[in-house]
Amino acid sequence: MRKLVLVAMLFCIAISSEAKRKHKNANSAGPQVSGNAASKSGPKPYDKVITGKAISKKGLFTVHKVDDKWYFEIPDSLFKREIMMTSRFSKTAGGGGVYAGEMENRQTVEWEKGPNKNVFLRVVTVISVADSTTDIYKAVNSSNLNPIAAAFEIKAYGKDSNSVVIDVTDFFKGDNAPVSLGAFTKKRFNLSSQINDRTYIDHISSFPINTEVRVVRTYTSTPSFMPNSGPVPFPSVTLPAAYSTGAVTFEMNNSFVLLPKVPMQKRLYDPRVGFFADEYSVYTDDQQKVDEETFIVRWRLEPKDADIAKWKRGELVEPKKPIVYYIDPATPKKWRPYLIQGVNDWQKAFERAGYKNAIMAKEWDEKDSSLSLEDARYSVLRYLPSDIANAYGPNVHDPRSGEIIESHIGWYHNVMKLVHDWYMIQAAAVDPKARKMEFDDELMGQLVRFVSSHEVGHTLGLRHNMGSSSRTPVEKLRDKAWVEAHGHTASIMDYARFNYVAQPEDHIGEKGLFPRIGEYDMWAIQWGYIKQVLRRTLKKTGRS
């Protein structure tokens, strides 16, 4: 019996030694590579990769689906071109306070051909800049290396040899930071590893300047049954789905939007004007100190070529591309006209900058199945089913120039409770319509309209202007003619919500009670969106 045990032990030791030897030999063959690069075999003929079974869609990238594989065909002209990549939730798990249409992350990326018949996806960070003709450019360039977010094997070259084909299946299905949930979100929702067999690419669409990738992602989540012992800097919450299944599923949309080859001309920031701004350090050979270049965030507005002469003379012209916001089809129909009015109210401000019909809102065309609310070419006012009494107006912009590319306004359903309580408390003494627990639709609609204008103001580049209300003389707040002509505050971006100084005997109507786009707002838009040549023209004509 002891001999049998000894033989068995020797056999086990032999197997273990052989396993270790094979493992050592495998490691000595070189570093292990994951993903597409794990089985490098070199590019194949185009028709061996993109076979007759391929379903193809042309656009920014030509997208091919062959069986269960997804391929990007990237033209050579797009290499080293900067592309804005945004990730949004298209469907979310309930109970987390995050909703469909809200952004998870964004970054600027560029494709680059690697040294071994592969393609790199780099994330571009703009911290310091220098002109490429200067000596110091070499030092700046060497000290700002952009990280490689992913590597792809070139599967084939295009039919005309002016493009490359890469397999993006594993990249989008994988839990990769640029296209997935960030570490903070995972911590916030108590999520751990991604469950790969419950994660898949739903579809990929491609358009002239953008490509959209929709992915369903499922994560494990261990429910926490113990309440937090005290305040923590980054509190987390276990989503209801985790208690019933131990898993949480999200649907995410990744947008690749091509940025202009030549960035828009920057408008330098002035701290006296309340615009959001970007900045970076500028290095030159001649300077004796580092310069900080700060520029405002704004949309690109340009007159049509045929109207440039009129525009320079100070005549109102329509821009080449107006600023258009679409109303989420999930918005209750009775509130849509008021949200649209809140956007269109900004038209008079842009007239100060020389443009007519420069900004507008439209209802979403639900009959056109080719449209997607997550498509980064469209700015959308997203209606969110939330008990949060608020709204917000972000924007996505080109970090090189401050050019706003698109905006998705977040409109929480319960913002109506907020404006109801504000108006009842501040204006019920002078407005009998405010003495109800449920306002008439017309009154609530007008309240929705002013909040819409405020949030749109943020997406145009304007910050809060808390100093605006200090410029209105207190005695004028009860002057009916004055406040109805000028408003009780000079900026819709202020938090002076209603004219609560007004008294019943003043007989001031809604025009003198409500906030609205004011004189400061119109001046700020003129300052931010007008060009110097037109400013000089308007000054000569007395219109500035």
Image (cartoon, rainbow, N blue to C red):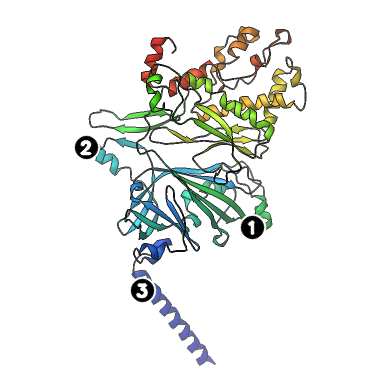
Q: From the image, tell me which residue sits under label 3.
A: 25
Amino acid type, label 3: Asn
Quadrant holding the C terminus: top left
Tell me: 154 left or right of 482. Answer: left
Amino acid type, label 2: Asp
State the image coordinates of residue 183 (x, y, percent, origin top left). 51, 48
User: What residue is drawn where x is 65% and y is 8%?
Assistant: 480
Please tell me in which quadrant of the rendered image residue 100 appears. Answer: top right
Residue 531 in sight from this viewpoint: yes
- The label shown at residue 246 is 1
Quote the CA–CA distance across marks 2 and 1: 57 Å
10 Å neighbourhood of mark 2: few (<14), some, or many (≥20)? few
State the count of labels. Answer: 3
State the image coordinates of residue 139 (x, y, percent, origin top left). 26, 40
Q: Is residue 65 above or below residue 464?
A: below
Q: Of 319 and 174, which appears nearest the observer?
A: 319
Q: From the image, tell me which residue sits under label 2.
A: 135
Amino acid type, label 1: Gly
Indicate which disc, 2 or 3, sits on the residue closer to the N terminus.
Answer: 3
Tell me: 382 left or right of 299. Answer: right
Badge 3 marks a residue whose secondary structure is: helix
Q: Is residue 448 above or below residue 240?
A: above
